[in-house]
Image (cartoon, grey):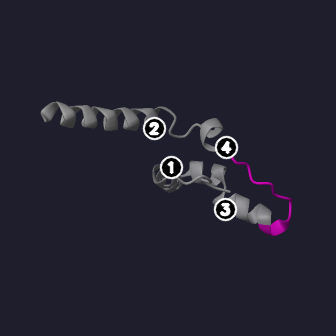
């Protein structure tokens, strides 16, 4: 009974360590690149909600981590 509990805990720990190893690696996370044209509204959207804007602040990195942990396919614009 306890070995099963320990084994399950260890597996969860492995998953957490594996996620931390590549938590903010752009090559792994940004698998889908959105096609966008340089329209003024889209430039503004990317500047406000884009990957670089999210990575620039602590709150943005927190937002990206929430989306990673939730399993979102697209993390940012």
Circle 3 residue: 48
Whole-number angstrom distance, CA of label 3 to CA of label 2: 26 Å
Q: Position of residue 55 (x, y in %)?
A: 58, 48
Question: Which mark is first along the chain, 4 or 2?
Answer: 2
Circle 4 residue: 31
Question: Which mark is first along the chain, 4 or 3?
Answer: 4
Q: Position of residue 65 (x, y in %)?
A: 48, 50
Please say if the residues under marks 1 and 3 sit with CB atoms less than 8 Å apart.
no
Within 10 Å of the Cα at label 3, are there few (<14), some (14-19), or many (20+) other Cα atoms? Answer: few
Q: Position of residue 22 (x, y in %)?
A: 52, 34
Whole-number angstrom distance, CA of label 2 to CA of label 4: 16 Å
Please say if the residues under marks 1 and 4 sit with CB atoms less than 8 Å apart.
no
Q: Which mark is residue 19?
A: 2
Q: Does 7 appear in magenta?
A: no
In screen coordinates, is 13 left or right of 55? left
Element class at badge 4? loop
Segment colored magenta: 32-41
The answer to which quarter of the image holds residue 11 is top left
Q: How many marks?
A: 4
Whole-number angstrom distance, CA of label 1 to CA of label 4: 13 Å
Q: Does 35 appear in magenta?
A: yes
Q: Quadrant of the N terminus?
A: top left
Question: Which mark is first along the chain, 2 or 3?
Answer: 2
Q: Quadrant of the C terminus?
A: bottom right
Element class at badge 3? helix
Please say if the residues under marks 2 and 1 sit with CB atoms less than 8 Å apart.
yes
Within 10 Å of the Cα at label 1, are there few (<14), some (14-19), or many (20+) other Cα atoms? Answer: some
Question: Which mark is first along the chain, 1 or 2?
Answer: 2
Circle 1 residue: 68
């Amino acid at each position: 009974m306890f070995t099963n509990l320990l084994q399950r805990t260890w597996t969860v720990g492995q998953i957490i360590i594996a996620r931390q190893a590549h938590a903010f690696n752009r090559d792994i996370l940004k698998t889908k690149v959105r096609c966008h044209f340089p329209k003024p509204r889209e430039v503004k959207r990317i500047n406000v909600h884009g990957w670089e804007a999210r990575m620039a602040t602590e709150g943005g990195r927190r937002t990206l981590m929430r989306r990673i942990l939730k399993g979102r396919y697209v993390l940012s614009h």
